[in-house]
Image (tube, rainbow, N blue to C red):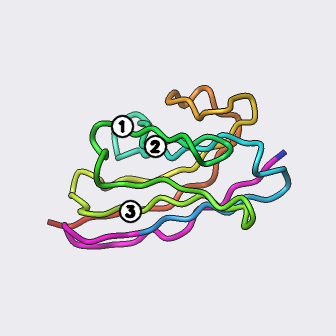
Amino acid sequence: QVQLVESGGGLVQAGDSLRLSCAASGGTFSTYAMAWFRQAPGKEREFVAAISWSGVGTRYADSVKGRFTISRNNAKNTLYLQMDSLKPEDTAVYYCAADARYAMGPSRANDYGYWGQGTQVTVSS
């Protein structure tokens, strides 16, 4: 059973960059497909990006494609989300998710069995 802890959130201005990290423990990280989701106040949790267990395959929500990059370091048991050209509409709590049932991370939140506690990202205009 894997435990996930996100970090790296904060308050930034529009156009700035942030890198989120998700540290995993208690499981074999390299066997888990991983993803980032986010949830803004009053909205449902939405898919941001996913990555395969090997790191070769990735997928992105249209709203972040070209601005965000998901990656992983299996030797360090860590998932990353590099966020560039941030916009106020990117403001949300960002969660990492894991599941060992898939080679490539799916885009539905209900498909993931393990979640972190979230990290707040606030982008001011």
Q: Horizontal placement of 53 versus 70: left or right?
A: right
Q: Residue at x 54, y 56 (%)?
A: 71
Identify residue type, mark 2. Answer: Ala
Single out the mark in the foreground, 3 or 2: 2
Say the numbered circle drawn on residue 49: 2
Farthest left residue in view: 125
Residue occupied by mark 1: 61
Q: Is residue 116 left or right of residue 43?
A: right
Q: Residues within 10 Å of mark 3 (few under 14, many from 20)?
A: many
The amino acid beneath tag 1 is Ala
Q: Residue furthest front?
A: 56
Q: Is residue 66 left or right of residue 112?
A: left
Q: Earlier in the sequence, mark 2 or mark 1?
A: 2
Callout 1 secondary element? loop
The magenta segment: 2-18
Q: Give the spatial CA distance, label 2 vs label 1.
A: 6 Å
Residue 4 falls within the magenta-colored stretch: yes
How many angstroms separate mark 3 from mark 2 (CA)? 16 Å
Q: Is residue 115 rendered magenta in the image?
A: no
In the figure, 125 relative to 97: above or below? below
Q: Position of residue 120 (x, y in %)?
A: 44, 62
Residue at 74% across, 28% down: 101
Q: Foreground residue, 19 or 58?
A: 58
Quadrant of the image occupied by residue 125: bottom left
- Residue where numbered disc 3 is placed: 121
Q: Is residue 58 above or below residue 118?
A: above
* Residue ID at (38%, 69%): 18
The residue type indicated by label 3 comes to Val
Q: Quadrant of the N terminus?
A: top right
Q: Earlier in the sequence, mark 3 or mark 1?
A: 1
Q: Who is closer to the viewer here, 41 or 15?
A: 15
Residue closer to the observer: 2 or 66: 66
